[in-house]
Image (cartoon, helix red, strand yellow):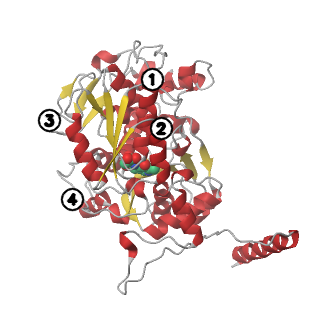
Amino acid sequence: MSDRHIAERVGPTGLQSTVQRCIVATCGSTYGIRERIYVCPRCNGPLEIQLGFPSRAAAGSLRKQWEARATSSDPLNHSGVWRYRELLPFDTSSPVVTLFEGNTPLYDAPRCAEYSGLSHLRLKHLGCNPTGSFKDTGMTVAVTQAALLGAQTVVCASTGNTAASLAAYAARAAIQCAIIVPHGHVTAAKLAQSMDYGAAVLEIDGTFDDAMRVVWGLAADSSIYLANSINPFRIEGQKTVAFELLQQCSWRVPNHVVLPGGNMGNSSALSKGFDELLRLGLIDGSPKIHVVQAEGAAPLARLFAEMGKVQLRDNAFSLPDCITPVEHPQTLATAIKIGAPVSWQKSLRGVLQSRGQVLAVAEQEIADAKAIIGRDGIGCEPASATTVAGIRRLVASGIIRHDESVVAILTGHVLKDPDYISHYHRGTLSLPSGGKDQDGAVQKIYGAFRNPPERVALSKDAILKSLDRRRRASMQGTKS
Ligand code: F0G
C-alpha cells in the first residue's frame, strides 16, 4: 500500500454531501460512498457518484491550483488523476494506490488529419499510461476504494486491458487479484502483463459477456470487490482525462471528442468529466462526444440508429429501457469484442446530451486507420483506431466540418497486439469468424498501407537500391 495520503479536503462542501446515486430517472435513490454496491439495490439501475461540489466561486481557483500541481514536487501531484482530487470522492485520511497514471500526451497528427479530411486533428494517447491503456486512470481510484473497504480480493472480467491494469494496482496494494478472461480471445501481451503482476489468470470457455456474468456472481461475496467499469469509482478516475485534456487545450473546448466503445465505461466517464467542468463554470460549453464501435460488435450503434432523431427538448429525453445484445460479437479489435455492454445507458446519455453520434466501422477501415496512426509516429492498438476510422466517416457525412477542432482518444499502446500489426503489414490479416466467403476462401483484409519487411542481400549496394526504390515509389504515391 502506498504511504501517501491525500493532503487536502475534497472541496469546500466536502464529502458529506457526496453520494452514490441511481441514474434511473424514476428512482434516483442515493447511497453512502463507502457502501459496497455496484448497481442500485432498489431498482438494479446504474450508479454514479454525485459530488458535493465546491461552489462556483471556490471552483474559480481550481484551474490555477491544478496547473501549479503539474510542476509540483509532491509525488501525489505527479498522478494525472489525484492532481484533480477536489473532484474525487475521498478525504484527507484516504491512502492512495497510485502508479503515477495519467499525464498522457496530446499529439498533433497531420497524416491522420489528411486521411480523415480535416485541417487539424489531435490524438490524446491514453496508451501511454503505466500499464499501456486508459484503464489505469480508473483503476487507481477503484483499488484505492477497494483498500479502504478492506477487500480481500479484487476481481474483473476482461478482454485484457482491465485485467492487466487491475493486476498491477492490486499488486501495488498487496491485495489478491483474480481476472476472468475468455480463453483464446485475449492478446498474448495483455495476458503476459497480468501473469507478471501476479494475478490469478482464470480463462473461461466463453465470451467476455459470459465472464462478466460470472464476476457478478463473485461480487456478491462481501470480501470480493468488483473492478469493472460498472463500478462508479472506476468512472471517477477515468473522468479526470477530460480535466487533463482541457488543461492541455488551455481550457479551449474542442468541437468534437471521439472514442472507441466496448463496455462503454470510458465514454460515460468522459461525458461526466466535461459535464462537471461545465457545471463548475470552468468551461463554457461541451464537446460533442462520438462513440465508435466495430461493426461485428456494435449493439449501441445499432440501438442509436434505431432510435432515429431523438427530440432533445430542454436537454430532456428518455433513455430506452433495454439494449439488444450481440450474441456472438466478432472483431479483430479484441479489446472491444463485447456484445452486452454494461454501461450503455450512461454512455448513451452522454452522447445524446452532447448531440454526438454512435457509429460502427468495418474491420478494413479499422486496420487502415491504425496503419495511418502509425505513420504519424504514434501507433495504438486496433480498438483505438476505430476513432480515426469513425472521424473519417463523420467528416465524409458532414457531421464534422473540415475546419472544426477534433480530439481522438487513443486507448491502448501499439505493443498490446503486435500479431495484428505483423499480419496487416505482411498481408495475412483475415476477417474474424473464420472470415470465409461463399466459396470457403479465407477473406483477407487488404492492407492499403502495408509495409512488410524485406529480405535483403548482405551488401551496401542492395540496401541503397532498396531505399532508392522505396523513395521513388513514395514520390509516385504523393503525385498520384
Ligand atoms: N479501447 C481499449 C484498448 C480497451 O481495452 C477497451 C475496453 C476499450 C477501448 C473500450 O472501452 O469498455 O470503456 O467502452 N476494454 C475492456 C477490458 C473491456 O476488459 O480491457 P470501454
Q: Amino acid at mark 2?
A: Val
Q: Residues within 10 Å of mark 2 (few under 14, many from 20)?
A: many
Specify the label residue 27 is tagged with.
3
Foreground: disc 2 or disc 3: 2
How far across and how far down the image is residue 385, in percent?
50, 58
Specify the label residue 241 is tagged with.
2
Q: Which residue is mark 4?
A: 324
SS at circle 2: helix
Q: Of all residues shown, which one is farthest toward the bottom?
A: 439
- Residue 34 position by quadrant: top left
Specify the label residue 85 is tagged with.
1
Picture residue at 59% right of the left edge, 54% below the top:
379
Toward the viewer: 428 or 120? 428
Rounded to the nearest angstrom, the CA distance separating label 4 from label 1 is 37 Å
Rounded to the nearest angstrom, the CA distance separating label 2 from label 3 is 29 Å
Specify the label residue 286 is tagged with.
none
Q: Is residue 312 visible?
A: no
The earlier-in-sequence mark between 2 and 4 is 2
Picture residue at 49% right of the left edge, 39% below the top:
196
Left or right of residue 431, residue 130 in this image: right
* Quadrant of image for the C terminus: bottom right
Q: Amino acid at mark 1?
A: Arg
Q: State if disc 3 and disc 4 touch (CB < 8 Å).
A: no
The earlier-in-sequence mark between 3 and 1 is 3
SS at circle 1: helix
